[in-house]
Image: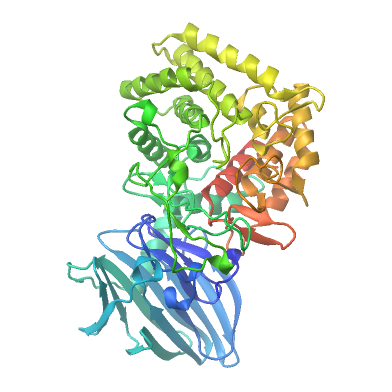
Amino acid sequence: MSGRIEDYAVIGDLHTAALVGADGSIDWLCLPRFDSAACFAKLLGDEENGHWQISPVDEAVCTSRRYREDTLILETIWETPGGKVRVIDLMPPRDDAVDVVRVVEGLEGQVAMRSVLRLRFDYGRIVPWVRHINGEFAAVAGPDAVWLRSSVPLHGENLSTVGEFTVSPGEYVPFVLTWRESWQQNDRDVDAIEQVNNTEAYWRGWIQQCRYEGRWADAVKRSLITLKALTYDPTGGIVAAATTSLPEQIGGPRNWDYRYCWLRDASFTLQALVSNGFELEAIAWRDWLLRAVAGDPADLQIMYSIKGRRRIDEWDVPWLEGYEKSAPVRIGNAASEQLQLDVIGEVLDGLHFTREAGITASEEAWSLQKRLIKHLETTWREPDNGLWEVRGERQHFVHSKVLCWVAFDRMVKTAEKFGQDGDVDRWRSTRDTIHAEVCARGYDRTRNSFTQYYGSAGLDASLLLIPRLGFLPPDDPRVIGTVEAVQRELVADGFVLRYRPEQESVDGLPGQEGAFLACSFWLADALYLIGRKDEAVELVDRLVNLASDTGLLAEEYDPIAQRHLGNTPQAFSHVALVNSAVLLGGG
């Protein structure tokens, strides 16, 4: 059985990522990219669907886990009746092949250890052909080949590769797993200890750029490292999470594939990167964004693959029972075909933000922006699927309309401040029209609050973004009323729900979900902006304390069961943490 979601730490090589459980088992790994098929899929099934466990043979307790300071190198310490060991897990930044490095270090006494490698390609379905070649175990299935090299004698057992050994104080026992395409030779001679040192130097050198020195400095640095770990280095695309189908409700069907890049994340992510000194990453993300949205604006999608591919077909995996039997397990994401009007606003907001930050943009970029805004002029009045990608009836979601306003507002400001050409008068007029409509049709005077969509009785946590987006000033009574309404109606045990799924059946799906962590950070931002700063700081403190022992956040949190829910680690949660910390400053 898989561990709790928060029991998993992530390691990665800037092309893909693995999840390592507190029991010493790697239960999720897609090779060679984030969106490739998994060769370890125990996370969504059982041991027969693939995993790699290194742990003591005898009864043992995992006494602590942590990342080596300012790195993505995971260290797990085990205590047994006979002694103590440390297991070091990492994936060196990618060169021409994928390496997973695991080193067992003896600390005290004599500890008997066991490594069990069970490879199952194609999401836990295909058992590879395993051979012993030149002192290594080689596993091949179709296009995939994996080699395992270790100083430990290895043998086959129950369709697994097993190694048993004893480690003493000061002794290091390395394991290196390498993936290459099956028609290539494995000519790599990887020194595990050297890779540990090189990887440590890489991450510490990278995080030194961080400018934030406030109250939540440790959490901010861990969040930025996590965002970097979720980056596909060749293109600069950042996936929403490293996993698919971790449930928003245990046993429920709200299970989605997040191994793709959402345009919606653009503005938030660019703010998090630029405001903390990571200009190169911001430029890479912006350039991925420009390549992805190039072409006919009518064909714009809300998400793309890490390479910018548009087709992301959704299908179910019948041979995986799902995390804690939360089915179905989904690959791909049909929401890629939805109409979500807010994404153009987020793209244009992000591009405006980079200009404001001094990152130059080309004339080609401005030409693309003008094509996007021209398209939005013809579509902004339509109902859409909204920020939360509802699979029910399309509505005139207030957040979507506010982001349409943002799109025109940022085009006006970019043209005026940076001297760009365009029909500024028409943009300004459309901006004002949208603003008036939202205030007239999306605001409930009786409750003194904006609503989820025109005519709705429900609320939506995305309304908390209204002051931060500049749609209305923070001291506007309608903003204050909306914040207070969200606190009354969407806060559950101190954390914020996206909306009430049972209310008006807006999302067309059964079941419930946990509190959405990014929305809880948005509440902190809104409280800060309306002057309730002590409450904002207290809320951020509580949210930061929800992080796992390795500092990671999933998508949601169940305050009753006190456990993480949804895909992990979740970029949106960590971006929201960083942006809240920057807004609140030193706290």
Against 179, is 447 above or below? above
Q: x, y (%) of residue 188?
A: 23, 70
Residue 500 found in image quarter: top right
Toward the viewer: 365 or 331?
Answer: 331
Quadrant into which the N terminus falls:
bottom right
Q: How many numbered circles does the render carry?
A: 0
Against 299, is 233 above or below? below
Q: x, y (%) of residue 186?
A: 21, 71
Toward the viewer: 561 or 107?
Answer: 561
In percent of the image, x 56 and y 73: which residue is there?
A: 22
Against 535, is 554 above or below? below
In percent of the image, x 55 and y 46: which residue is there?
A: 572
Q: Is residue 475 visible?
A: no
**Colour scheme:** rainbow
Q: Is residue 379 visible?
A: yes
Against 5, is 454 above or below? above
Residue 362 found in image quarter: top left
Residue 198 found in image quarter: bottom left
Q: x, y (%) of residue 582?
A: 61, 39
Toward the viewer: 95 or 372?
Answer: 372
In percent of the image, x 17 and y 67: which residue is there?
A: 183
Q: Position of 239 compared to 149: left or right?
A: right
